[in-house]
Amino acid sequence: MPDYDYQSDNRTFSQVIEDIGVKDDPKLYLGELVNAFGERGFGALMLFFGLLSVAIGIIPGTTTILGAPLLLIGLQLAIRQDQLWLPRWALRRWIERETYRQGVEKVLPRLRKLERLSKPRLSIMTSELSEVLIGVATVLLAFILILPIWGGNLVPALIISAFGFGLLQRDGLAIVIGWSAIALIVVAALIIWLTWTWVSPYLLPFWSWLNGLLPQAWTWLTGLLGG
């Protein structure tokens, strides 16, 4: 694995992730990605890992590899660390470059459209306080992303991608979309919990009655068949 000097350049984000895929090395190391994004840092890597989780997260084990660095990124963003740091063991983690290429091909067309539409706006959503809150939310979402939940990576990955895109482009609208998605999830969970709280007193007696009835029905059925 090569050394990483964390240099940056002036290419667009979409061009950077496309160029990463054309290299010949079959292994794509996390350290190579960090180096490629350079000073773009937190927002670029949040967007990258979020999009890649959406694209290839169905492959077993990939969400753990992609979610772990997001957890570290979120922690550092929450404590207002100026420069992104990842441990050497994390930089040595890798995925197949061909898998990466296939995933990038799925998201590049939409990403390029978003880049053309994006512009700096709603600066309050990219303030220092906002970045701290985004860091805390990213940590919680990354925990969910790491868990082996079938299909459970999609929504957290999309929200992290929205946050990352907003920070990268200084586009507060993207961050508003991310927070709106979290708000919808919280409201939906609250509705489900309240519904269960109201309905369960009526369902539990019925369930107890049903549990008592089933053995009797089974005894009757076996006796009928035996006769």
Image (spheres, rainbow, N blue to C red):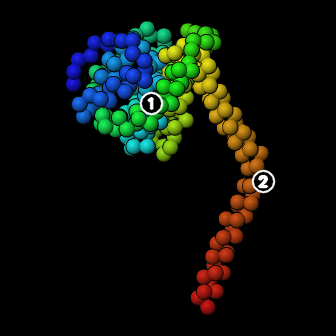
Residue 134 image-quadrant placement:
top right
**Image location (x, y in percent) of residue 7:** 32, 11
Which type of secondary structure does the marked residue at label 2 adopt? helix
**Image location (x, y in percent) of residue 79:** 48, 12
The answer to whether residue 12 is visible is: yes
Q: Residue furthest bottom?
A: 227
Estimate the spatial distance between the alpha carbons at disc 2 and disc 1, rounded to whole Å.
51 Å
Q: Amino acid at mark 2?
A: Tyr
The answer to whether residue 141 is visible is: no
Left or right of residue 48: residue 173: right
Neighbourhood count class around disc 1 (C-alpha, 10 Å): few under 14, some 14–19, many 20 upward: some
Q: Amino acid at mark 1?
A: Leu
Residue shown at 38% from the left, 25% from the top = 17
Q: Which residue is under mark 2?
A: 202
Q: How many marks?
A: 2
Residue 186 image-quadrant placement:
top right
Quick one: quadrant of the N terminus?
top left
- Indicate which disc, 2 or 1, sits on the residue closer to the N terminus: 1
**Image location (x, y in percent) of residue 184:** 67, 32
Residue shown at 47% from the left, 18% from the top = 43
Q: Which residue is under mark 1?
A: 108
Quick one: quadrant of the C terminus?
bottom right
